[in-house]
């Protein structure tokens, strides 16, 4: 990793003033065993103060944020977004029982009996970006529940299309719906074309599944997703885009946190986690990531949710520790 940097910014991420960031840097960049006493101490500190503690302090005792129910709204303060953000901050259910309470509440209210995470609690409220974000976040938080197996199976099946009925086909036990409208990441929000933002979320979640938990169906979904993301040069982000016919500029704006809007950094992260870090098809995207660092080996915050979440993560267009952590994590794994 260090031979790809203008300067080694790791010491910047390990500064004691931000315990949550320091813990993640230790966990993901320092090659420490999970049982390392210093790492465990840093994890505890990250849950006592900083963003994780601030977000958990806003949780209602029942396990939801802002509004009871499936938790999609209001953006970006409700349960869905709080749980996604906690996962990106390195929160751990083993460290704080409130995290398990929140995860249980979400699964009870947002996951349907057929395996769809839903914006409204019914199967029709499913969409790839939400399904992938929540499946991946719950794994990252250390939450384990047999119902998640069904959620991953649904997610994989919608990619491959196996035994799926079309929109409106009420005779088939499993079918596509208004937004999740077809195989290969087809989404009505993208004009019924494949949505690369959704594909990245789905593949990132599937990448986090242990190999032993990847069924043949999941393996086929991963293969289809990888083929889709490599169908063009990922650095170009020239995936189908119904809104303008050209890629969203957000692809090239690295940010923190990352919700349903996706950037090339997260796309590369998904492929790297799946073992494609040395694939020639990623060469341009990896070079793009390296080129965005400054002379000190730091990356700027280019896409921000400042004022829209429980916690802000720095000023826009300034070197940012969280974005730098994201970048170093990808370069290290690649």
Image (cartoon, rainbow, N blue to C red):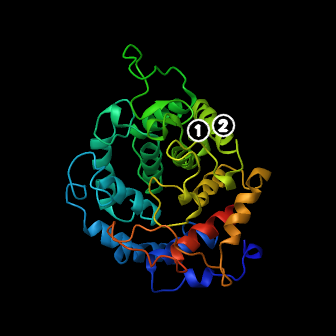
Q: How far from the left and from the top, in percent, is residue 241?
A: 55, 44
Residue 140 as seen in the image, left or right of residue 229: left
State the residue lying farthest toward the right: 280
Q: Residue at x 64, y 56 (%)?
A: 268
Residue 197 as seen in the image, left or right of residue 173: right
Which badge, 2 or 1, comes first in the chain's sequence?
1
Q: How far from the left and from the top, in percent, is residue 46?
A: 41, 74
Q: How far from the left and from the top, in percent, is residue 141?
A: 43, 57
2 is higher (above) or lower (below) than 252:
below
- Identify residue for label 2: 223
Q: Which of 140 and 314 is in front in this view?
A: 314
Q: How far from the left and from the top, in percent, is residue 276?
A: 72, 51
204 is higher (above) or lower (below) than 89:
above
State the residue lying farthest toward the top: 171
Q: Which residue is drawn at 50% across and 74% down?
A: 23
Residue 74 as seen in the image, left or right of residue 321: left
Using a 10 Å C-alpha cutoff, classify the residue at mark 1 as few (fewer than 14 neighbours), some (14 to 19) or many (20 or more): some
Q: Is mark 1 on a helix, strand or loop?
A: loop
Residue 32, can we see it? no
Number of labelled discs? 2
Q: Considering the image in quadrants, where does the N terminus appear?
A: bottom right
Of tags 2 and 1, the one toward the viewer is 2
Q: Is mark 2 on a helix, strand or loop?
A: helix
Using a 10 Å C-alpha cutoff, classify the residue at mark 2 as few (fewer than 14 neighbours), some (14 to 19) or many (20 or more): some
The dot on residue 45 is: none
Separation of disc 2 and disc 1 at Cα? 12 Å
Q: Considering the image in quadrants, where does the C terminus appear?
A: bottom right
- Identify residue for label 1: 214
61 is higher (above) or lower (below) than 49:
above
Q: Nearer the viewer, residue 73 or 20?
A: 73
Residue 226, can we see it? yes
């Amino acid at each position: 990793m260090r031979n790809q940097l203008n300067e080694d910014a790791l010491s910047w991420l390990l500064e004691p003033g931000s315990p949550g960031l320091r813990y993640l840097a230790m966990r993901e960049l320092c090659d420490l065993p999970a049982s390392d006493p210093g790492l465990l101490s840093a994890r505890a500190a990250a849950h006592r103060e900083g963003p994780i503690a601030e977000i958990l302090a806003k949780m209602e005792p029942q396990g939801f944020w802002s509004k009871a129910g499936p938790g999609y709204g209001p953006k970006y303060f409700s349960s869905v977004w709080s749980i996604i953000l906690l996962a990106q901050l390195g929160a751990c259910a083993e460290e704080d029982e409130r995290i398990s309470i929140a995860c249980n509440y979400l699964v009870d209210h947002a996951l349907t009996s057929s395996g769809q995470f839903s914006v409204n609690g019914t199967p029709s409220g499913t969409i790839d970006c939400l399904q992938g974000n929540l499946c991946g976040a719950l794994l990252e938080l250390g939450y384990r529940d047999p119902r998640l197996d069904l959620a991953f199976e649904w997610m994989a099946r919608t990619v491959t299309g196996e035994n799926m009925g079309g929109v409106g086909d009420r005779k088939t036990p499993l079918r596509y719906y208004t937004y999740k409208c077809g195989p290969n990441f087809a989404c009505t929000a993208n004009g019924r074309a494949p949505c690369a933002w959704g594909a990245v979320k789905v593949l990132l979640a599937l990448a986090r599944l242990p190999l032993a938990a990847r069924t043949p169906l999941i393996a086929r979904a991963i293969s289809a997703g990888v083929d889709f993301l490599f169908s063009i040069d990922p650095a170009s982000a020239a995936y189908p885009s119904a809104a303008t016919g050209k890629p969203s500029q957000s692809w090239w704006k690295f940010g923190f946190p990352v919700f349903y809007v996706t950037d090339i950094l997260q796309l590369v992260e998904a492929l790297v986690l799946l073992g494609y870090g040395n694939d020639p098809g990623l060469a341009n995207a990896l070079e793009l990531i390296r080129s965005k660092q400054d002379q000190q080996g730091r990356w700027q915050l280019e896409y921000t949710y400042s004022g829209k979440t429980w916690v802000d993560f720095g000023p826009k267009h300034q070197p940012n520790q969280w974005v730098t952590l994201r970048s170093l994590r990808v370069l290290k794994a690649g």
